[in-house]
Image (spheres, rainbow, N blue to C red):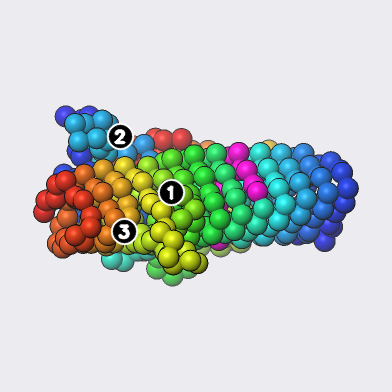
Amino acid sequence: MTNKDIRINGAGMTAGGDFRKVIIRGEGSITTDLKCAEFICRGSGRAMGQMMAENVRVAGQANFHDDVQAKNVRIFGQTEFLRNVQADDFGIWGQAEVQGNIQAERVRIKGRLTVQGDVEAERFEAIGAFEVNGLLNAGTIQISVKSFGPSKVKEIGGDEIIVKRRKGLIGLLHSRGILNAESIEGDEIYLEFTKAKTVRGTNVRLGPGCDIETVEYKTHYHAHEDSVVQKYEKV
Amino acid sequence: MENELISKKELLELTGISYGQLYRWKRKNLIPEEWFIRKSTFTGQETFFPKQKILKRIDKILNMKDHLSLDEIAAHVSPNPAAITVETEQLLKQNIVSNVAVKLFEEAFGKKPILNFDELLTIFLIDQGLKNGSISLEEGRLLLHVMRDHYENVKGKNGELILIRKLGLQIAMIIGSPAELFIENEARIAYRANIAQSIEALKEKLEANNQEDGNENGKQS
């Protein structure tokens, strides 16, 4: 790896290449494929080619027009990925939209995430609102629904799936967070405040606030009295 | 019967695997995306699989998962021939290379239950020479070592593996191709193999065997 840096302060446009640090402070565009150890965007940035980086950090606003492959991706500002994201650790504190798929070891959402494709991860942790229009497939899925509004996933699949409502700062105010899904399938499932068509699993436990059309379970099933289940069967 | 589908629910009942396992294998690319076929039924969207293929694949995974990691199995079932790995045992069973060549390889580099494509190629090249009688076992050993030490340099480009004999002395070498080679009159080229051509031949052999298996490896691009 080289020890050259790119720094854009003000407005600038440059071609990509192989660099150590790439820092955009004003408004900058990288017009071709970029390989770097560190990509930091504090202003408004645009990467038009593929991005391969150790660390990607967006504190302002950024658009990635092609695939992004990185060890760590941290989004504090607002970011749009027009294609796929592949990362070891993908953390969102701000707001991100991914038009393609996400493939990661770990996804952490503390802000807001919208994904048009699928999400694959070993761990998926969400506090806050998110939307996955394809399949969310992860080993461990922990979702805290909060008062930010509803979260939506088309399909969820994994080993362990836990959805819980987390109380807001003011415990007196009723939290309205809810998760909507078409189907949820896993080995160990615990759900609260979830609306779904089908839930299938080895052990299915439903806490309060669920509205499920069909539950299919293999070993164990239990539903809280404040949940509505139209049909359940042992298969 | 070839195109018969099986629903996800039936599949899990039949094989005894769990949802968690199925999703994990999908994440690890043990089961290709195209096999997940979504269809509308009266109960909503359901996922179906091509029955023969998925049952065969799950059987394979269940057999391998005790002694191999999921990543190793993934490499094994990968459609990309360059990423293919083969079980040594399977290799012999399918008669892709001879026992003698494998033994030679194992003596030199130790026993390996799983071979990657480059290792397999090395064995294949030596096997060709042994089979047509152009090299001896001792010379095969020389070729093994030259492949290990220098194949990296011509990988992705074309190259030739060569063995030259002169007065009871042997020299093994790899040269980049295209290259012209002129040697003195007393020396003789005992063995000369074009590596790119051998790769193709090997892939074809693997694919032919996979098709006999009814297995789709190597067919997908």
> Residue A36 location in percent, x, y?
73, 55
Residue drawn at the location 50% of the way across and 67% of the way down: A169
Image-quadrant location for residue B104: bottom left
A214 left or right of A194?
left
Do the numbered discs 1 and 2 sit on residues whose CB atoms are within 8 Å?
Answer: no
User: Alpha-carbon neighbours of circle 2 within 10 Å: few (<14), some, or many (≥20)?
Assistant: few
B176 left or right of A151?
right
Q: Nearer the viewer, mark 1 or mark 2?
A: 1
Query: Residue beneath label 1, please?
Result: A151
| Extreme residue toward the right, this view | A10
Q: Report the span colored magenta.
A: A78-90
Q: Chain of mark 3?
A: A
> Residue A32 location in percent, x, y?
75, 40
User: Alpha-carbon neighbours of circle 1 within 10 Å: few (<14), some, or many (≥20)?
Assistant: many
Residue B28 makes an appearance in the image:
no
Query: Residue beneath label 3, please?
Result: A192
Residue drawn at the location 66% of the way across and 39% of the way down: A65
Total labels drawn:
3
First in sequence: mark 3 or mark 1?
A: 1
Disc 1 secondary structure class: strand
Q: CA distance from mark 3 to mark 1?
A: 13 Å
Residue situated in front as seen by the camera: A141 or A36 = A141
